[in-house]
Each structure stands twice: as C-alpha cells, then as structure tokens.
Image (cartoon, helix red, strand yellow):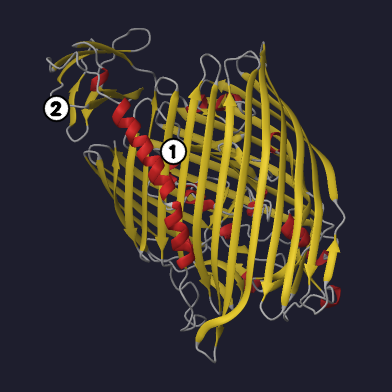
C-alpha cells in the first residue's frame, strides 16, 4: 500500500499541471465578446430551416428556468437577455441548438435549424477503413454517444456495453475485478481476446494473453462515443477481431470551453472523482485533459461456507489521466497527440493474497488531412505496461499473512504504425494502407524457497490492406476489403530451476501468412430502411502466455504449447435490416452464421504428458491446444420507441448457438456447447429524461444459463440471472445530483464459477450518490 501511495503522490503532479495549464488558457483566451448587446436586453429572434422557411413551435429554454418563449407561425420570438448566459432552441423535428449569449452580435438575430439526423446518416469511424455514413456500411453497428443514458453514472466503460445485442459483459467482482478477468465477449465466441478493442483507433489488446488488461485505464468522462461493430473485422484490423470490434473514441477540444467535475460515493466504501477541462484557442490549437480517481474496499465474494474468517476483502485504488493536444495546419490537415496514464493497485485473494501494482501508458501521434486529393491518415503509437505482483500465503502457525509465496513482474511493450491513404475516384472511395505492430513480453517469477520460472517472447505483425467503399447506385452501396497479415512469434524462451536443475529452452519461431477478405452490400429500400449483407473471415494469432507459460491458474495447472496455430474464422455471413420511423421508432435486426477452426482451448491431459521439471502441485493439468471445428449462429435485435421526446423505451435480444463439430483429441466433446456462451441475453430500459425536471431510468438484464467448461459438466453450469438497476439525476443550474442503484433486488448470483470449492458471487445491491458540475 505504501508503494502505491508513493507512486500516486509522484503521479498526481501530472493531472494538476495539465489542469492548471488548461484552466489558464480558459482564463486568458475565453474573454466574453458580447459588448454589442450590453446596452440592450431585448432580443428579436427568427428561426428557419436551410430553405429559409419559418419554423413554428420552437421552444426557447433556459437552464434553471425552463421554457421562456416559443416561435410563432412566422418563426419569430422575443426574449429578454438580462442575467442570461445561454439558451437552447428545441423542436421535435430539428436538432437542438445551444446559443451562447456572448455570440449574438445584434438585437435581431437569425438561426437556421438542421433536421434531426436519421440514424442511418450517422458517421462511423470504425466499421470501414474511412469514416462513412451507416447507410453505406453493411456491418451491424451500434453507436453510444456521450450523452446516451447507457453512459450516465457508470463506474467503468464496459458497464455501458451490457445493454447492446451481441455483447456479453462479465465483471465478476465489480470494481475490484482487474486485468483480463473483465470479460467482454461478442457473438458467443467464448473468450474476451476474440474481440478487438481500440482506443481512438489503436489496438489495446495486450500481447500477453490477447485480452484487454486494463478496462479501467480510460477515464469515463473522456468518452465522446463508443462504436461497436459486430462480426469479423480482420479485413481492416487484423488479429483478434473475430467476434467484433469496439472502438473507444475520446472527446476533442472544442471552441466552447469544456469544464466539468464529478464526485460519487457509495457501497463498499467506494468513491470516484473526476475532472475535465479544455478548449480550442489561438485559431489552431486545442487542448483537453481528463483525470479520474477511484477507490473501493470490495466485499466478501464467496459463499459463507467457503469464506474463512481470516480472508481479506478485495480492494482497489486507481488513477487515470488522459490528455489530448491538437494543431490545425493552414489548409494542410491536423496533428493530434494523445497521452494516457493509468496507475492502479488491486489487492485480492483468499488463502493467498495477491498484492498487485499495474502501470499502463498509451501514447499516440496522428496526422490526418481529409481534404487532400490523396488524403493521408498516419498514426504512430507506443503502449507500455508494467505489472507487479507479490503473493503472500496465510500462515496458520503465526495466524497472519507472512508466508512469501512468489514475486512476479511482467513488462509489456508494444509499438506500431498504421498508415492509410484515401482517394476518391468517381463512385469509389479507395483506401490503401499498411499496419506494423511489434510487441515484447517478459515474464519474471520468483518462488520463495523454490526458484525462478521465466519466459520471454516477441510477437510481430506486418500487414497490408485495401478497401473500396463503392456507390453502385444511389441506393446500393458496397464495402469490399482485403488484408494480408504476416504474423510471427520470435525468440520464445523458457527458464526454470525449481527442480534443482537449470532448465533452459529456446523455442522455434512460429509464423504464418493469412489473408482475410470482406464483401458487404447495403441497399436503401427506403430513405429510412436499409437492408444489408456481409461475408467476411477473421483470425487470432496465439499470444505468448498460451505458447510459453506453465503455472497454476484458478483450479488447474495450465501448460503452454509453442506449437499453437492461429485461430481461424473460416466464414461469417450476416443478413440484416435497420429501420427508423421519424424520431419515434428505431428497429434493427441481424441473423448470422459462422464457422471457426483451430479454436484455442484448455483441455485436460494426463499427468504423464507433463514435463518432469514442472511441479503441478497436485492440480489437474490443462494444456492449450487447437481444436477442430466450431459452428455458431444467432440473431441480434434492438428496438427503441420514443413515446415523447423525453420518454422512451428500448429493448434488445441476443440469441447464440454454438456447437463443437470436430474435436480430434477428445471426440466425446463433439456436440457440446462452447463454454461461457449463454444462448439467451435480453435487456431493456424505460427512460424519462427532461432537462428542466429530472432523469429517471429503469434497466433490466437477463442472461440465460450456460456451461463453464468444454466438458459441459452439470456442476459448472451457470444458472440464468435477471438483474435490475435504477438511475436518477436532477439538474440544479450547472449542478446535477444523481443516485444510481445496481442490482436493485439484491440478487445473489455467480459472477464466476471455476470449481465446487471456488466460485465468486457478483456484487449485491449497491447504491451510489454524487454531484457533478458541467459548464
């Protein structure tokens, strides 16, 4: 704990310096310019559409006062500007417009409102190689904007994904869940490392297990939107994008100052505080910074019969700092620099306490110039992680945790380049690009009184891709892509002297060349109805942990396999439709089927197959192998209905069926379901959101039963669960008071089940209350 506190103290200067820098810019550069209206408090307004047709019934709303006027049949209104900083123009058929009083240059002013955007006109930066409207994209896509109800009052970003079709989220011990124990699985692929996670377009799946180690490493208040693309994306992004791709897009500095703060406190002595500040200035520069601190004491997560009196509840402390600086060149594009820093210390365990410390840094520099004839998009990045763990076992003789078990350290380094060029030829938007990523893993572990066990390795990718977004007709659009990946694991080494002898192994290099195509078609049957179909393939290269590691994990001993091949999605077919009726109703549905080969799985092996120099500690041994063939198919549906502009209902349903079709080493598994794959997922929400009154929403999630192992054993069958949450917020001027209740009816259910003597309960009812400030 002292080590973390020292690290926290040394790291606190960074958010403070950045915050002071940005606040100084706000004071110096954001000087009110509304001198023209200082002597006049009356405003005559006119509201029209882009064709200069007057719009009647536009309400003029002031925070804290509600509606103060509305436009007449000629589109005109009159208001007093006395003691007013801003107001908002609202109409059911048009996008709302927030007006800064200081920007009004005369006592008579004209505003033009834009019609509300059809959901198919929303731009996605993830589903194609170039930002494109959804109506021209064949994939199944969901976009969560920063003001969406899913992102209100969340503790972690993965929490917002739990209500989307095709996505399963498991955070088995709440906020104290760390590392790859946080599981976000798409389309029933059974493992989180078969979903690619991007942060502003950069892969953050680590090179150790291929999962996302630090879901907590991005401040929640920094998100502009989350884009979820279901189905394989390897034709654009390469490895890991088998079930789908999730892109976390952060906010950019804007002309209007950004200033906000949030504080919440709740169950398990949990508190969370965050700040953000930023602005564009001097015409070309922009800067924005986010900082967040979280702490929780956790809870007794095992059944009463298993929880011993000396067990310690898990705890967590973490700090996030995210900063972005941009510069616009004169008619020559934009240069953006991003730095993310995360420091956290989780503490967990039962008979053995794992006192961990993890530091992560993500840094990137990006240049874009979308107006150029050959529009460049060049991104270089460096991701670094350093994980330390001190394991201390319970000593019954001393009645204390003082038996040193092991110390470990795992530094990870990843650096890469993604370079793309976009060119428009007639109806074609062609993107050509190259992607290079180089990683290094070092795992050091010292067992007290026994010896050393280390492994190291590199994983490199060199890739080239081409993509064409083609308007075949005004209504028919195509996405065609092809990517070549050269994957290689190099310099794999293993060292062990725990048997009394030095065992040193240098593994052969492993590599392969993989080509992944994609063909998609979308057709605008109507302006508000899109039909779509996709064919694609995908792959995932095996990471160092599964190839070289040999150590206890959970209730078994896990043995690596340097002969692993990449997992392959041999095919995936989607057909779907999206429909929007005015701003009242949104419907989306997709049917899909896919087949995988060489799926990576941990299977039981005989003790005689284990090398003599390894001590498996009497545990059953599972080795990672590639199994033959798995078939999946399913359906995803989503519906949202707005009874009124401030009152809506939404629901989603996801069905997924998986079957092991061929399993060479264990034919008796053929016909079984894949593990961790619930067949049914249902979610829904009832949302009331009126700015001048309050926000109130009720949320429900149902997850069907599923097996926790490939053997489909009954004792590891997770039962179905249904959980309810409530969110409430009340705005008082620039302040918002909020209350959030999760697991409303205190449902007790398993978040993870590894054996009859080791299973974890998810958090019970939790209540959090707080206050936030927004300029």
Residue 220 vs residue 663, the one in the foreground: 220
Q: If you read the primary sequence from the N terminus, does the residue marked by circle 2 or circle 1 appear first?
A: 2
In this picture, is 446 found above or below 387?
Answer: below
Residue 425: % across, % down: 68, 12
Determine which residue is flagged by label 2. 83
Name, please, the residue furthest toward the right: 508
Quadrant into which the C terminus falls = top left
In this picture, is 384 found above or below 74?
Answer: below
**In percent of the image, x 58 and y 37: which residue is there?**
364
Badge 2 crowding class, 10 Å Cα cut-off, few under 14, some 14 to 19, many 20 or more, is few
Name, please, the residue furthest toward the bottom: 397
In this picture, is 559 found above or below 399?
Answer: above
Determine which residue is flagged by label 1. 640
Residue 541: % across, % down: 76, 48
Report helix, strand or loop for mark 2. loop
Badge 1 crowding class, 10 Å Cα cut-off, few under 14, some 14 to 19, many 20 or more, is many
Which callout, 2 or 1, points to the residue nearer the camera? 2
Q: Along the horizontal axis of the image, is 259 left or right of 337?
A: left
Q: Which mark is residue 740?
A: none
Name, please, the residue furthest toward the top: 52
Query: Which of the 4 image quarters holds residue 742?
Result: bottom left
Q: Along the horizontal axis of the image, is 103 left or right of 4?
A: left
Query: In the rendered image, is residue 252 in sight?
Result: yes
Residue 178: % across, % down: 54, 60
Report helix, strand or loop for mark 1. strand
Query: Which of the 4 image quarters holds residue 57?
Result: top left
User: CA separation, marks 2 and 1?
Assistant: 39 Å
Residue 756: % across, % down: 60, 77
């Amino acid at each position: 704990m002292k080590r973390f506190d020292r690290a926290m103290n040394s790291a606190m200067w960074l958010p403070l310096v950045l915050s002071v820098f940005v606040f100084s810019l706000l004071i110096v550069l954001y000087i009110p310019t509304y001198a023209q209206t200082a002597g006049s408090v009356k405003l005559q307004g006119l509201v029209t559409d882009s064709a200069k047709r007057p719009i009647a019934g536009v309400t003029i709303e002031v925070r804290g006062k509600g509606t103060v006027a509305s436009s007449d049949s000629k589109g005109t209104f009159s208001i007093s500007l006395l003691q007013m900083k801003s107001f908002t123009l609202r109409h059911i058929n048009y996008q709302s417009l927030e007006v800064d009083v200081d920007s009004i240059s005369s006592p008579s002013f004209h505003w033009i409102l834009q019609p509300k955007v059809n959901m198919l006109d929303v731009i996605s930066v993830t589903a194609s190689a170039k930002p494109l409207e959804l109506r021209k994209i064949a994939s199944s896509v969901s976009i969560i904007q920063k003001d969406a109800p899913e992102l209100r009052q969340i503790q972690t970003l993965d929490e917002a994904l739990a209500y989307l079709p095709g996505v399963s989220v498991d955070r088995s011990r709440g906020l104290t869940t760390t590392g790859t124990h946080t599981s976000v699985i798409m389309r029933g692929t059974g493992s989180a490392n078969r979903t690619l996670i991007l942060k502003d377009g950069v892969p953050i799946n680590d090179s150790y297990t291929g999962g996302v180690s630090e879901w907590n490493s991005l401040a929640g208040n920094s998100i502009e939107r989350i884009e979820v693309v279901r189905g394989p994306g390897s034709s654009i992004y390469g490895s890991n994008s088998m079930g789908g791709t999730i892109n976390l897009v952060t906010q950019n500095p804007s002309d209007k100052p950004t200033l906000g703060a949030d504080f919440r406190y709740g169950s398990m002595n949990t508190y969370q505080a965050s700040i953000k500040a930023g602005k564009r200035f001097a015409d070309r520069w922009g800067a924005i910074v986010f900082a967040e601190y979280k702490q929780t004491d956790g809870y007794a997560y095992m059944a009463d019969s298993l929880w011993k009196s000396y067990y310690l509840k898990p705890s967590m402390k973490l700090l996030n700092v995210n900063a972005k600086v941009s510069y616009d060149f004169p008619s020559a594009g934009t240069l953006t620099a991003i730095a993310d820093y995360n420091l956290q210390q989780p503490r967990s365990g039962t008979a053995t306490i794992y006192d961990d410390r993890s530091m992560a840094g993500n840094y990137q520099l990006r240049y874009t110039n979308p107006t150029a004839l050959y529009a460049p998009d060049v991104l270089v990045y460096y991701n670094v992680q350093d994980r330390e763990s001190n394991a201390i076992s319970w000593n019954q003789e001393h009645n204390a945790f003082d038996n040193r078990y092991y110390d470990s350290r795992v530094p990870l380094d990843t650096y890469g380049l993604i370079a793309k060029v976009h060119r428009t030829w007639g109806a074609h938007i062609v993107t050509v690009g190259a992607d290079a990523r180089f990683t290094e893993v070092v795992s050091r572990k010292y067992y007290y009184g026994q010896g050393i066990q280390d492994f190291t390795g590199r994983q490199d990718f060199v890739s080239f891709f081409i993509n064409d977004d083609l308007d075949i007709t005004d209504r028919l659009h195509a996405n065609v892509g092809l990517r070549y990946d050269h994957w290689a694991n190099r310099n794999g080494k293993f060292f062990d002297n725990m048997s009394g002898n030095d065992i040193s192994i240098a593994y052969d290099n492993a590599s392969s060349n993989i080509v992944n195509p994609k063909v998609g078609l979308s057709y605008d049957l109507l302006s508000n109805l899109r039909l779509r179909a996709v064919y694609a393939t995908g792959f995932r290269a095996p990471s160092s942990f599964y190839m070289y590691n040999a150590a206890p994990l959970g209730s078994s001993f896990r043995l690596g396999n340097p002969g692993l091949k990449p997992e392959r999605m041999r095919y995936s077919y989607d057909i779907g439709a999206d429909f929007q009726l005015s701003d009242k109703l949104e419907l989306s549905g997709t049917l899909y089927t896919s087949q995988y080969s060489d799926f990576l799985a941990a299977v039981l092996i005989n003790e005689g197959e284990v090398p003599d120099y390894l001590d498996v500690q009497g545990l059953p041994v599972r080795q990672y192998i590639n199994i033959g063939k798995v078939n999946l198919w399913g359906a995803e549906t989503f519906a949202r209905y707005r009874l009124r502009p401030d009152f809506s209902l939404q629901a989603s349903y996801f069905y997924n069926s998986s079957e092991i079709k061929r399993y060479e080493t264990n034919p008796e598994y053929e016909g079984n379901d894949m593990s961790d794959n619930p067949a049914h997922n249902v979610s829904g929400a009832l949302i009331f959101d009126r700015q001048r009154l309050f926000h109130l929403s009720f949320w429900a999630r149902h997850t069907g039963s599923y097996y926790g192992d490939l053997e489909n054993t009954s004792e590891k069958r997770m039962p179905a669960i249904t959980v309810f949450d409530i969110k409430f917020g009340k705005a008082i001027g620039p302040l918002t008071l909020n209350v959030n209740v999760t697991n409303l009816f205190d449902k007790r259910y398993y978040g993870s089940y590894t054996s009859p003597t080791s299973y974890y309960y998810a958090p019970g009812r939790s209540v959090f209350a707080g206050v936030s400030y927004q300029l």
